[in-house]
Every structure is written in structure tokens, then in C-alpha cells.
Image (tube, grey):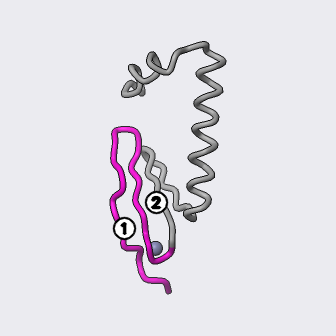
Amino acid sequence: MDKPCELLAISRTRACDVWMCEDCNTVHLGIGPLSLRLKMAHFFAVVETLLEAAHRIRVLRNESNVAVEANHTRYH
Ligand SMILES: [Zn+2]
């Protein structure tokens, strides 16, 4: 049985929390009730995809980045 991950807190916000385990080279991502454990490369690929998606949504909605940032902390 693998030993439990030793998690290093990377970033915590109201939106999500990000932890890293250097032993198994993973990122643990918590979003509300969801908890994801991703290989490092997969995590970065997901981040790139999300940034691209966010960019496309902003373009589709014809919003400036400034307006979106101002609403960044509103989730509900
Ligand atoms: Zn680990």
C-alpha cells in the first residue's frame, strides 16, 4: 500500500485549493465537494485548457478582461 501523500499547500482561494505532492508528482485540486488528483503534466494541460476556455467565453460574451476580473469573486 502506498504511503499517504505529503501535501504542500500551493494556493487556496474561495474558488478552489491546490496542493502538491512531490513524492508522486501530483497536484491535488479541491473545488467545493470535488477533489481531483492529477499528474503534474495533466494538471498543467487542464490549466491551459481552462484558460483557453475562459478566454473564448470572454470573447463570446464580448466582455473586457477588466469587467470579468471585477466579478471574479462572485460565484453564486
Ligand atoms: Zn503523493
Q: Nearer the viewer, residue 26 or 3?
A: 26
Residue 42, placed above or below residue 32: below
- Image quarter where the C terminus lies is top left
Farthest residue, direction top: 62
Q: Residues within 10 Å of mark 1 (few under 14, many from 20)?
A: some
Residue 68, placed above or below residue 20: above
Residue 69 marker: none
Which quadrant would residue 39 be assigned to in this image? bottom right
Q: Residues within 10 Å of mark 2 (few under 14, many from 20)?
A: many
Question: In this picture, which residue range is highlighted in magenta?
Answer: 1-24
Q: Residue at x 60, y 49 (%)?
A: 46
Between the C-alphas of marks 1 and 2, the distance is 8 Å
Q: Confirm if mark 2 falls within 8 A of ligand 1.
A: no
Q: Confirm if mark 1 falls within 8 A of ligand 1.
A: yes
Is residue 18 magenta-colored? yes
Please say if the residues under marks 1 and 2 sit with CB atoms less than 8 Å apart: yes
Residue 7 marker: 1
Residue type (three-letter) at the residue carrying disc 2: His
Residue type (three-letter) at the residue carrying disc 1: Leu
Q: Nearer the viewer, residue 37 or 1?
A: 37
Residue 26, placed above or below residue 36: below
Q: Which residue is mark 2?
A: 28
Q: Residue at x 63, y 36 (%)?
A: 52
